[in-house]
Image (cartoon, grey):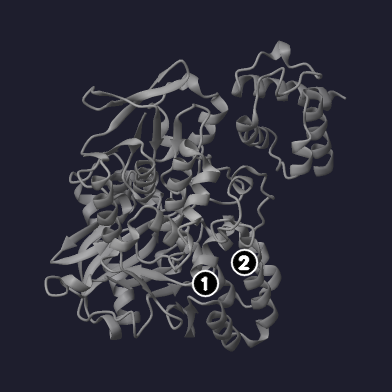
Amino acid sequence: MRVVVVGSGVSALTAAAILAKNGRQVLLIERQPEFGGALRQFKRKKIAFDVGFHYTGCAGSGEILDLIWSYCAIRPRLRVLPLGSEGHDRFEFTDRTPAVRGYFSYPRLAEELRQHFPAERAGIDTYLAAVRQICADVPFYHPEQPLLPFLRGYKNRPTSLAEFLVRHIGDRYLRAVLAAPGFLYGVPQSQASLEVHALVAHGYYSGAYTLDGGGQSLVDAFLAVLAASGVEMRSGESVEQVLVEGEKVVGVELAGGERVAADQVIYTGHPATLMGRVPASLFRPAYWHRLAGLANSLSLFAVFAEGERELDIHQGPLNYYLLPGSGDILSADPETPRQRRPMMMTGTRTAADELLHQGRNGIILLGLGYWQEVRQFEQSSSGRRPPGYEHYKARVAEEMIGVAEKRWGAVSGTIRPLAVGTPLTFRDELGAPEGCAYGAMHCLGQYNPEVRTRLPGLFLAGQSTVMTGVAGASISGLIAAGEILGLEQLWQDVVRCR
Amino acid sequence: MEAEDALRRRVVEVLAEEFELDPEKMVPEATLYEDLGLDSLDAVDMVVVLEKTFGMKLTDEEALRSIRTMEDLFQFLLRLQAAER
């Protein structure tokens, strides 16, 4: 009774830990040399940079991440740092002052918004109530509710976030601040659904948390627990084929030709990359067409840099956002000029016990990026890019640094780039088609695939299958393990960790 | 009537292709689940295919759930088309 888990991001690690705890023999296979997917850190000049994890919601006592981490026995290995009621993101506009504080707290946020936009009081209340109301029926926010009716039941047709905001909010700057959590699921504002927005925003408005040691600490905690529970882990190897006999999974074949027997496979690559790895005849053409046609979430440009000074997240904001004064804050148009795109600055967090050994002035700039911008270089691979690409990359970085220094130079000082990521980098390093930051979009008009597939024993869990972010990925892993172990029983056991 | 026949033909054609079904068996009284062998896992794929083929949003969950036979499906789509005009 072996389960092969393909990939080693949060969803894969979570699924593997849950299965191992329940006595399953688990083999985890990662294509990259290191485990951890988007949670992995890399170092430049002794500064540890997080690529995919900067903060999360849902990690407070009794919340879903706390429950999953407790169940997986990794919670004691983590130092979860709540931002507190004063914790906030700072939202600035290219053409408006002052900045608005996006508190990680419903009451503080409501107070701040009413103060800045006194005429919009009713709209603010309507919006916040709608977000809460949508999440009232979601078991991940209310673990006392059963899981299956939510997962299997019909969902109401999603409604447009943009239409909702226009209907209830007159001030476009306020609309932009309310739409800003869109950054955390990577959907253009015009295609965002109120329901998905609410799922993400509710966590964000309910509290934010960082981890001492960043995303790497989560990876390390999982790896320690997996090793202790006898999970076999292999990196630098890729799964080429899911082997099937009599319409049932019987194993996988690795790149070198080695075959490993397995009763179940949890595939955490992008669903569209399942094609070619599973015999085509196993699924109806409609399913393949659906996977191939999935529209991907937005991508990013990232500048990993060294600032003159350390950003103090306990005194100041956690993240600094610069939002365009006109148009959508997240435009669907890849031709959107860079000055009309949003940008974010955040600092690196240093693990308390490594303060002596680590650089502390790490700065990360994230700007909205589109695959179309780098598509001309798509044939190249990591480490072998044409000179034109390097120039392009340097120019984008210079531009982003220029904007950041002008805006936030008082806190960051001079910013010197150490590494730059583009949609192409994310495609190649994270196996994300088109460099998508959050897998296939959870947006209006798109039907994302479920965790279970028509092939018994094959499950999808990665690349934001169920939802985005660390919480979304952890939930995807939980559901994949649950499909194997029995969903409702697992859910009850996890909830009992409260 | 002509438009109605065209829609019926198109539904049979596209579902036969996308779900590898035998068009001969896709008569109006055929049930999607028992006779044609589709199941709940196919339901979403079917919505995606039909939305794309006819350029309409299949929003009425209640009505979708009540579809049992090919004829139910035809009538559902015809009603939707009429409403969009």
Q: Amino acid at mark 2?
A: Val
- Give me the disc on residue A131: 2
Residue A432 placement (x, y as % from top left): 36, 45
Chain containing the residue with disc 1: A
Q: Is residue A479 visible?
A: yes
Residue A423 falls left or right of residue A117? left
Asked if residue A299 can be seen in this view, the reply is: no
- The outermost residue toward the right is B1
Helix, strand or loop at label 2? It is helix
In this orientation, which residue lies closer to the viewer: A56 or A147? A147
Q: Nearer the viewer, residue A53 or A57?
A: A57
Mark 1 → mark 2, Cα distance in angstroms: 10 Å
Return the x and y of residue A418 as percentages of the image width and height: 18, 64
Chain of the residue on which disc 2 is drawn: A
Left or right position of A286 against B50: left
- Residue positioned 38% across, 80% down in the render: A317
Q: What residue do we see at 35% from left, 24% from top?
A: A251
Res A106 quadrant in image:
bottom right
Q: Where is residue A264 drawn, in percent x and y?
A: 40, 30
Label 1: state its secondary structure.
Answer: helix
Residue A205: mark in rendering: 1
